[in-house]
Image: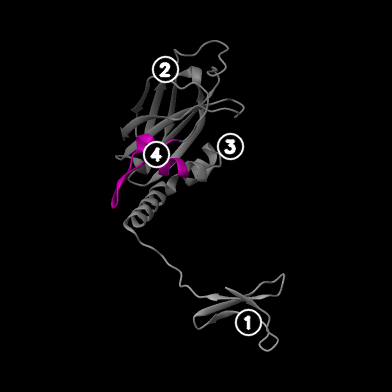
């Protein structure tokens, strides 16, 4: 790379044969260096990584807005997508898959529940029940009034819905109505608890696939 001042040619910029010239704004100096065409290496490892990233972005597109809500204190969408890319995208190129059971929607210190069940009711109504035997009076990590947040994801439509604060921990049950056009599809289900003032969450828990 060479630096020069030219009173004959004035400011020089751009590519000139095998060299490229530019001028530094602050000093006004011109710099001349050998032009090197940009490279776009496509090693098998890089191609596989790009394919994995593309697959993940496509599969997780329906969760972007939700991650922005559930992980709002940790970076929102970027944090949720990054977590899912690291932990839930399985397989090797070109045979990737999404392990729904490894998706996470919340992290925190609140106590999780033990046994959970989800039951199809009439039409697309869904009843969720959870264990409350681990609640201790005045327990800092499992209050009776902790909110219940339910997440459902339909593979066929690649859509997800969040029902936040649908009930409280102590009630041990909640019923919600899923979109009617989800009827006859398979739906993945998650639950997490949140403190009434929104200051704390529990880790989200996956409790299986429901056939509507």
- Contact, mark 4 vs mark 3 (Cβ under 8 Å): no
**Residue 178 highlighted magenta (yes or no):** no
Image position, residue 99 (x, y; %): 34, 39
Residue under label 3: 73
Circle 3 sits in a helix, a strand or a loop, which is it?
A: loop
Q: Is the image coloured rainbow, by chain, by secondary structure, or in one colour?
A: one colour
Q: Residue furthest left?
A: 95
Q: Is residue 124 visible?
A: no
Alpha-carbon span between mark 4 and mark 2: 27 Å
Q: Which residue is mark 1?
A: 12
Q: Nearer the viewer, mark 4 or mark 3?
A: 4
Report the span colored magenta.
81-104
Who's the residue at 53% across and 79% down the image? 19
Residue shown at the point (51%, 32%) measured from the top left: 164
The answer for how far apart the CA atoms under marks 2 and 1 are is 74 Å
- Which of discs 4 and 2 lies nearer the camera? The answer is 4
Give how far across and how far down residue 197 sits, in percent: 62, 27
Q: Which residue is mark 2?
A: 131
Choose the circle earlier in sequence order: 1 or 3: 1
Q: Secondary structure at mark 4?
A: helix
How much space separates mark 1 and mark 4, taking CA atoms? 51 Å
> Which is closer to the viewer, label 2 or label 3?
3
Answer whether residue 91 is magenta in the image. yes
Q: Quadrant of residue 46?
A: bottom left
Q: Quadrant of residue 211?
A: top left
Query: Quick one: label 4 or label 3, which is nearer the N terminus?
Result: 3
- Between the C-alphas of marks 4 and 3, the distance is 20 Å
Front tag of 1 and 4: 1
* Residue of label 4: 87
């Amino acid at each position: 790379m060479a630096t020069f001042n030219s009173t004959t040619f004035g400011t020089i910029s751009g590519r000139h044969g095998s060299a490229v010239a530019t001028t530094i704004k602050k000093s006004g100096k011109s710099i001349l260096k050998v032009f090197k065409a940009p490279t776009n290496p496509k090693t098998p490892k890089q191609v596989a990584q790009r394919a994995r990233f593309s697959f993940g972005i496509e599969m997780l597109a329906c969760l972007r807005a939700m991650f922005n809500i559930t992980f709002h204190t940790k970076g929102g969408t970027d944090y949720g997508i990054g977590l899912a890319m690291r932990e839930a995208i399985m397989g090797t190129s070109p045979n990737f898959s999404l392990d729904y059971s490894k998706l996470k929607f919340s992290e925190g210190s609140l106590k999780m529940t033990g046994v959970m069940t989800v039951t199809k009711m009439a039409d697309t109504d869904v009843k969720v029940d959870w264990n409350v035997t681990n609640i201790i009076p005045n327990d800092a990590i499992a209050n009776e009034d902790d909110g219940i947040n339910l997440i459902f994801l339909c593979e066929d439509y690649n859509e997800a819905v969040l029902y936040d604060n649908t009930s409280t921990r102590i009630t041990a049950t909640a019923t919600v109505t899923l979109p009617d056009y989800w009827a006859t599809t398979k739906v993945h289900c998650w639950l997490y608890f949140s403190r009434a003032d929104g200051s704390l969450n529990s880790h989200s828990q996956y409790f299986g696939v429901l056939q509507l």
